[in-house]
Amino acid sequence: MTATADFDQSHLTDSATAMSQFELDYAAQRRRARLGWTIGTILFLLAFAFTTWIGDFFKVTQVTMPDGSREWRWIIPAGIPRLGEYIEKTIPTLRWETLGADFANWFWRWKIWMELLFETILIAFMATVFGVIGGFLLSFPASRNLAPNKWVLWITRRYLEIARTVPELVWALIFVFCFSVGPMAGVLAIGLHAAGALGKLYSEVNENIDMRPLEGVKAAGGTWFDQIRYGAIPQVLPNIISYTLLRFEINVRASSIIGYVGAGGLGQEFRTAMSFQEYTDLSALFVIIFVTVMIIDYGSEKLRHRIIHLEENRP
């Protein structure tokens, strides 16, 4: 009886000691977590304050007052009224009595703008095709779980990084210098950048696939290309289509800007309107781009849902 009591007492003592040690370890872990969050928050606030200072968010500038005098003001409240003035200049005068004539005056270059809009969409389409081809082919050797070896992985990843790191406008300037002004420079610029961006997105999708189908193809004697064709592509195809449609919408917006440097599309009209301070032309061009992107987004969503059979599953 005494031995049993001693055993129970020893067992209770060990349990209490273990529980006490667990509580101490848990408290220490909580302290480390709070310390890490505190340090991270302080570093974030310091970085944020330094960035706002570098970005002139705290800048004080001279502002012309309504009576013509000049006074020092903080730049943000001083600039917001000017933003309102700029937006006001872009709003056309529309009267119900002469609505048709006012719209005609607002979109007075609509024939030229429609031609350039069609050119913009074609630039985006061709660039998306080139970007999908390049990004799709390079995404598999750029995936850690699918690359044949580490050197192929390193080379393809560095190429994709270079392609997407350089902005479309910079690529456009380079290709305008090489091939002169025109849509070709825009297609090459957007296509090269899109290949880098899509290759990155596609490779991340590839790294999340189930490897068992690929192992089955390999066990049956399939080559690396057979594993990709029959094991990987069927799994990633819905995501690839979704990212492709999203990229097409992005490329439409990009192709409407790169014309600013002579690479075709509506961008050249933006440059002309800003140079001559034709503010109502700017708003008309914005409306055209906005409606176009909205229609493309709606069509892309419907197409994507039809491909992945989402519409069929809705009640």
Image (spheres, rainbow, N blue to C red):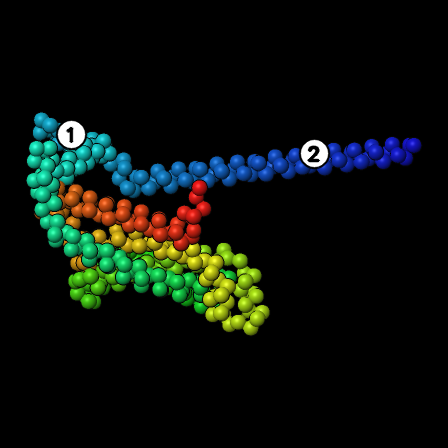
Answer left or right for 4 relative to 224. right
* Numbered mark located on residue 20 in the image: 2
Q: Residue furthest top?
A: 67
Q: Is residue 208 above or below residue 279?
A: below
Q: Is residue 245 above or below residue 79?
A: below
In x, y percent, where is residue 218? Answer: 55, 69
In x, y percent, where is residue 206? Answer: 46, 59
Q: Label 1's element?
A: strand
Residue 272 seen in the figure: no
The quarter of the displayed image where residue 46 is located: top left
In x, y percent, where is residue 223? Answer: 51, 72
In x, y percent, where is residue 194? Answer: 32, 58
> How far is mark 2 from mark 1, CA to CA?
67 Å
Residues packed near mark 2 inside 10 Å, few (<14), some (14 to 19) or many (20 plus): few
Q: What residue is shown at x 52% (from left), y 37% (from top)?
A: 35
Q: Label 2's element?
A: helix
Answer left or right for 44 relative to 32. left
Question: Identity of the amino acid at label 1?
Answer: Glu
Residues at marks 2 and 1 touching, judged by CB atoms closer than 8 Å: no
Q: What residue is shown at x 10% (from left), y 33% (from top)?
A: 95
Q: Is residue 106 above or below residue 229?
A: above
* Numbered mark located on residue 71 in the image: 1
Q: Nearer the viewer, residue 262 or 23?
A: 262
The quarter of the picture where the N terminus appears is top right
Q: Nearer the viewer, residue 219 or 90?
A: 219
